[in-house]
Image (cartoon, rainbow, N blue to C red):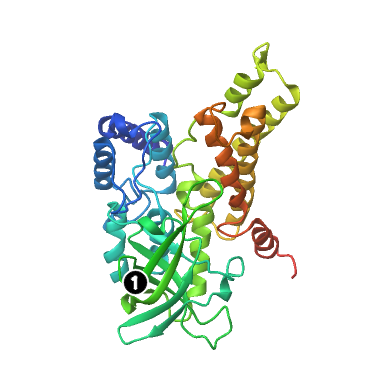
Amino acid sequence: MSEAALEEFRLETRAWLEANCPSGAKGEGQVPTGSSKIAIDDPDVTLWLERAAEKGFTVPTWPVEYGGAGLTTQQFVVVVEEMRRIGARAPLMGMGTSLIGPTLLEFGTEAQKDNHLPKIARGEVGWCQGYSEPGAGSDLASLRTRAEDNGDHFIINGQKIWTSGAQSADWMFALVRTDPDAPKHEGISFVLLTMDQPGVTIKPIKLISGNSPFCETFFDNAIAKKDDLVGELNKGWTVGKRLLQYERAGMSQLVGNRPQDPGPTLAEVAKSYLGTEDGKIADAALRHRVVVHDMNSQAFRLTQRRTVQEADEGKTPGPATSIFKMYGTELQQDKSQLMCQLRGTQGLGWNGAGFTAEDLEWTRSWLSTRAASIYSGTNEIQRNIIAKRVLGLPD
């Protein structure tokens, strides 16, 4: 697209956003996931979702026939930039738009695309991921949840763990073993199943941070229709690996189509707790750490965006996404630790009147981010992928 055409698109997008994004959908606040079990608190958020879905802006790069706007990568970047300019939150986020949707676009049948993608684009369904099991986390191919052929459907028995958002999901995409006699990376299939059925039991897991974002999910003769087998029978490992690449660095994440981090910046916290000298953070050592972190974060965001622009149009990069997963989680952990250290003893609070709500929130955030280098594939696993698939090093 020429620069003139792109600039014209920018002006059109800017005008549309200013006319259609309600004030209640700007700044911090709720972003719908599509789940039918999570109420939307603000009518402005509902209105924003409806308008964006009609425009195709919930999934801008998807084809129009599946609810998208059919935008190029360049146009998508423009939409993100213009949304950020006015402080607009994403109208819709979740595993539907970022994980299973792109996977179905690549591997799904036409019937599967027609059935699932428009509902995702309209924010009518929430999804969760059934991958990890007890004893099959980083070594995911050791999974033992079985799916037995029963005519037009599979009967599923087994257990998943660390199932993010399972308690509010309408559907799950899962890896299941359909041939127990095949080598462990074979005999695995990728299926879709509804969560609201008698054979599915969900138990939230309370973490040390006090939150319960993860669940145990048990299958006792649960049903997945044959029509919801994605890809070939016993060839689900290929589909499952590709979805992980979307998880580690999907298009929205790479170009920054996420709400801004809530709360103050590192520099603002440092100045508030440590004081200033000539307008700068008073503690030179911590000032250096804040500056280094901010520089690394900006370099990381620019690298992500450059990677999108260099990739095939509208496609998420391949194994290189492991670099983003690894480094991104380390940045996240570094920030949360810095936030606590800048507060001094106030950064050690767990409860009590001597700590503000913000102090307590960041202590729990610091605890939560300890898991970031474990879930979605440990950083050690990411380094192995980078070594083998990106750098081509021998085993």
Q: Horizontally, is 366 left or right of 235 in the view? A: right
Query: Where in the figure is residue 128, as x and y percent of width and height?
Result: 41, 60
Query: Where in the figure is residue 65, as x and y percent of width and height?
Result: 27, 58
Instruction: Identify which residue is drawn at 42% across, 65% down.
Output: 106
Which amino acid type is shown beneath numbered disc 1? Thr
**Does 1 appear above or below 249?**
above
Front in this rendered view, residue 272 or 386: 272
Instruction: Identify which residue is drawn at 34% across, 42% down.
Output: 91
How many numbered callouts?
1
Q: Is residue 233 visible?
A: yes
Q: Is residue 66 visible?
A: no
Residue 283, picture quadrant: top right
Quarter of the image for the N terminus: give it.
Answer: top left
**Does 104 appear above or below 255?**
below
Residue 66, picture quadrant: bottom left
Q: Residues within 10 Å of mark 1 (few under 14, many from 20)?
A: some
Residue 168, picture quadrant: bottom left
Q: Horizontally, is 280 left or right of 321 in the view? A: right
Instruction: Identify which residue is drawn at 48% across, 76% down.
Output: 145
Label 1 element class:
loop
**Does 110 appear above or below 355?**
below
Query: Where in the figure is residue 11, as x and y percent of width and height?
Result: 34, 31
Q: Residue furthest top?
A: 278
Q: Horizontally, is 193 left or right of 364 in the view? A: left
* Location of mark 1 (residue): 109
Query: Where in the figure is residue 274, as x and y percent of width and height?
Result: 66, 20
Quarter of the image for the C terminus: give it.
Answer: bottom right
Front in this rendered view, residue 66 or 210: 210
